[in-house]
Amino acid sequence: MRTKDSRTVLRGLGGSNAPRLPGALAEWNRQYEAGEKPTALKLKKRFNEIRREPFPWTWEVTKNASDQPFLDLGKAYTAFFEGLKNGKKRGRPKFKSKKRSRASFYLANDQFELGDHRIWIPKLGWVNMAESLRFNGKVTGARITKTADWWFASITVELEDAQPDPPHPLTHAVGIDVGLNRLATLSTGEEYENQAFLKTALGKLRQANKRLHRRVKGSKNREKARRQVARLHYQITCMRDDVLHKLTTRLATCYGIIGIEDLNIKGLLKNRRLSRSFSDAALGKLLNLLTSKVQQRGGQAILVGRFFRSSKTCHCCGWKWEAMGLSDRSFICQNPTCAYAGFSQDRDHNAALNILYEALRLIGLVDQAVNGIGSDEASAGNENRLPLDSPPRVKLQQVARSDHQ
Ligand SMILES: [Zn+2]
């Protein structure tokens, strides 16, 4: 939703949420330090007692726009204390900054109204929406947020309990190798490149970032440059998500069993290079989208442990190329009795096939790992026990063919 006239009002509503409620957090901290037990409701009561004087603006905006910050703050503190209990470190709630935080506010279901393609917001009236609500059910609330220069309405709808999903109609299985060089390689040999647009867009983003840092702090031009960077970030995310959605929908529809490597996202995200961080985020999102879409359709997504050596192992005989480096783009099996001996296989395709076999083994469709390359403990002991010249397992070969159907 985006109309020029509505923007100022929306900013007023969204802005009133946090940055201009400086008292709430300070009051919370004061009560906490004084040994009192602050709660969101207590705090709100106190705020209502005193707000007429120093906060006359809260009477101008909607009721919920000034309720929600307290509930949010309560939630943040609950998470903070839960974190302390569980030994997980989580930062104490911080003062919001207008620059760093997203403008947003919440509306309860009696605070707004939905029409065909439009939403009625207090103080603003009807605002056009880019699409109409797709779900039929009880509307429980809406959150209005701002990303880059666009306003979004997230509407929560309670749906009737869905019937349990029927199992996926297809039993085709596929293994997927995901990576930074090529987005995805399937065990069928299909390849999905990382889109070239990302490179172009990243170049633009880099330039915009440079411009931003040349501008004088606090100046209007800096604000302009900052907004451009935000817009570019958002656009890149949208383009990338589009690719990921199309790929994952296709996979989840065409295959009932999907093997994919579990990723160490936290480790990946330590990388600070711009292009890398975008690809890393893409891999995480791909995994999330895929698992949820596969489950929705009644299929199975099998996560193969990330210590499983899918790249260094021959998918046919299990021979391991220990010295294989990151730059080796093709896998060449050196086992003289292997059908693929001396034959150059695409690195990622070979990995995808290994992931497929391992996934099938994990769910019990194949009873033995290819020469002990399993990712779990049970098969780890088997390593090197099977002779290298044992013939490729017939069962596995059948499975391999089934994904070409
Ligand atoms: Zn081999």
Image (cartoon, rainbow, N blue to C red):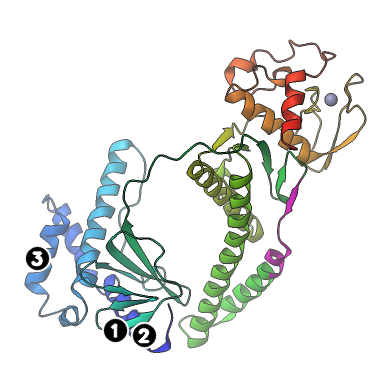
In this figure, which residue is indicated by the disc labeled 1?
Answer: 124
Part of the protein shown in magenta: 190-200
Would residue 96 be visible to someone looking at this image? no
Residue at left offset 22%, top offset 72%: 111
Q: Which of marks 1 and 3 is in front?
A: 1
Q: Which of marks 1 and 3 is nearer the N terminus?
A: 3
On the image, numbered disc 2 is attached to which residue? 6
Q: How crowded is mark 2: few (under 14 residues within 10 Å), some or many (20 or more)?
A: some
Q: Is residue 71 left or right of residue 142?
A: left
Q: Are marks 1 and 2 in contact (CB under 8 Å)?
A: yes
Q: CA separation, marks 2 and 3? A: 32 Å
Q: Where is residue 43 in the image (x, y as percent from the top left)?
A: 13, 61
Q: Quadrant of residue 261?
A: top right
User: What residue is shown at x 12% (from left), y 49% (from top)?
Assistant: 35
Q: Label 1's element?
A: loop
Decide whether residue 197 is among the magenta residues.
yes
Q: Is residue 34 left or right of residue 332?
A: left
Check residue 46 in the rendering and tell me which mark sits there, or answer none: 3
Q: Position of residue 284 (x, y in %)?
A: 56, 48
Position of 241 with respect to 76 (left or right) is: right
